[in-house]
């Protein structure tokens, strides 16, 4: 098996890997990607529109150690990222008030990253099999050859979207060099439901605004009923914080009971829910659909539970439907200024492979790019 000597080996060809390759000087790095094409996950993100970043950028939108991510987010924030994109003739547009998307499709971002990163050598359809280090040199054995370099960057992502080549290779490499892993789990993903909520499946396609409380965390947005359970932005964000146990859903987040106390309208018409959703809840609560003023005190009490509806998810839709993976390499073992391992000199970790996960809204792409920029600042001294 031939040896291939490089200055820097980057494992992965997703957002963080391609950004680092774009920032580095020409011919200083090789990217090793198991897929036949680069940026496979970029193409499917944001429904193919690619939510790149957010006007409201703050560590509070991440499930992560704030002290770890803050330097990267501040040093290469949304303003810096947007400036870099515009410099390369990509002009994201704002949707949903604060979220920056590609104008037409995710292909625009991928085209930019492909153009700016092609100054490096990219090895496609090449699977990493083993990594070790001898005499300050990293050896990366793949399905085609063995790469050697003094600097190794692991940007292999998480476990979501296995059909796009997701694997646990990043975690395996980290443990090889003494790192601990925070248990990975699907995140930004829908919930399956218990028997008590099987009627949700009959409401598939209906959507309504909700407020969800998971412990001390609160998530607002729409909830979508599906044939498997519940999804939608509020649910996906809630999954970021859920481990097990119950969540509390306010199905009437901007609704008050006071102004309808004497109403003669039928309940299903009064509730600000899709009518079939209202009727389904009434059936489950064993309340006849009738004018509100005719409700007994017991019925009123049961109806009010829609403001604090208890639900214990049976689980999630899994990695095949998850936008991202939460958990990953323990960030206490990685330098927050450089992304370099505290356990092995010359070893870096970027993006989703780390225990850093953002909410919906462009936060995970921002982290991918910001962490890549921190890594670039660290290693550029050796290659410029």
Image (cartoon, rainbow, N blue to C red):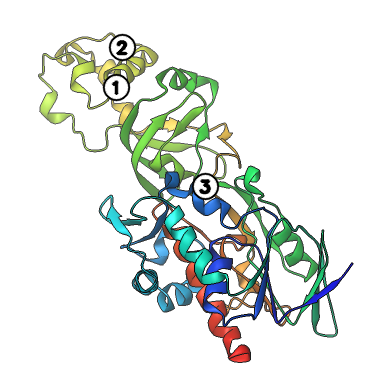
Q: Earlier in the sequence, mark 1 or mark 3?
A: 1
- Quarter residue 55 falls in: bottom left
Residue 154 at what x, y percent from top left? 67, 68
Disc 1, SS = helix
The residue sitting at 31% across, 11% down in the picture is 287
Q: Residues within 10 Å of mark 2 (few under 14, many from 20)?
A: some
Residue that carries the numbered disc 3 in the rendered image: 323
Q: Specify the quadrant that holds the N terminus.
A: bottom right
Q: Is label 2 in contact with label 1 (beta carbons under 8 Å)? A: yes
Residue that carries the numbered disc 2 in the rendered image: 287
Horizontal side of 17 relative to 60 (left or right) equals right
Between residue 41 and residue 207, name the one nearer to us: 41
Residue 100 at what x, y percent from top left? 33, 58
On residue 303, the disc is: 1
Q: Specify the quadrant that holds the C terminus.
A: bottom right
Residue positioned most to the right: 1
Q: Is residue 333 above or below residue 136?
A: above
- Quarter residue 161 falls in: top right
Distance from label 2 to label 3 (Cα)? 38 Å
The residue sitting at 63% across, 90% down in the picture is 382
Distance from label 1 to label 3 (Cα)? 34 Å
How many discs mark residues in the rendered view?
Answer: 3
Residue 52 at what x, y percent from top left? 41, 59
């Amino acid at each position: 098996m031939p040896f291939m000597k490089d200055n820097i080996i980057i494992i992965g060809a997703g957002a963080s890997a391609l950004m680092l390759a774009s920032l580095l000087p020409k011919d200083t790095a090789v990217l090793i990607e198991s897929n036949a094409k680069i940026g496979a996950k970029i193409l499917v993100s944001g429904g193919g529109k690619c939510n790149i970043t957010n006007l409201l950028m703050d560590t509070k939108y991440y499930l992560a150690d704030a002290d770890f991510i803050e330097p990267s987010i501040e040093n290469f924030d949304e303003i810096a990222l947007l400036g870099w994109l515009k410099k390369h003739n990509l002009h994201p547009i704002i949707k949903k008030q604060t979220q920056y998307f590609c104008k037409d499709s995710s292909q625009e971002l991928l085209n930019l990253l492909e153009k700016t990163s092609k100054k490096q050598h990219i090895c496609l359809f090449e699977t990493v099999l083993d990594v070790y280090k001898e005499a300050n040199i990293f050896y990366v054995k793949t399905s085609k050859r063995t790469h050697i370099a003094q600097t190794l960057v692991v940007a292999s992502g998480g476990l979501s979207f296995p059909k796009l080549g997701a694997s646990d290779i990043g975690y395996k490499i980290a443990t090889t060099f003494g790192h601990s892993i925070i248990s990975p789990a699907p995140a930004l993903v829908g919930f399956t439901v218990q028997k008590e909520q099987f009627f949700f499946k009959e409401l598939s396609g209906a959507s309504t605004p909700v407020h969800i409380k998971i412990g001390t965390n609160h998530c607002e947005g729409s909830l979508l009923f599906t044939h498997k359970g519940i999804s939608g932005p509020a649910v996906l964000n809630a999954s970021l914080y859920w481990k097990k146990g119950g969540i509390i859903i306010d199905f009437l987040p901007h609704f008050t009971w006071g102004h309808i106390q004497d109403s003669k309208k039928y309940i299903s018409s009064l509730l600000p829910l899709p009518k079939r959703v209202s009727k389904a809840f009434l059936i489950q609560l064993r309340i006849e659909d009738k004018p509100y003023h005719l409700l007994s005190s017991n019925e009123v009490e049961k109806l009010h539970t829609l403001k604090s509806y208890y639900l214990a998810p049976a689980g999630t839709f899994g990695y095949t439907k998850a936008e991202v993976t939460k958990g990953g390499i323990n960030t206490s073992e990685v330098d927050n200024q450089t992304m370099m391992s505290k356990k092995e000199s010359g070893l870096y970790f970027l993006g989703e492979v780390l225990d850093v996960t953002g909410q919906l809204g462009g936060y995970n792409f921002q982290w991918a790019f910001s962490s890549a920029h921190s890594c670039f600042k660290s290693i550029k001294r050796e290659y410029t």
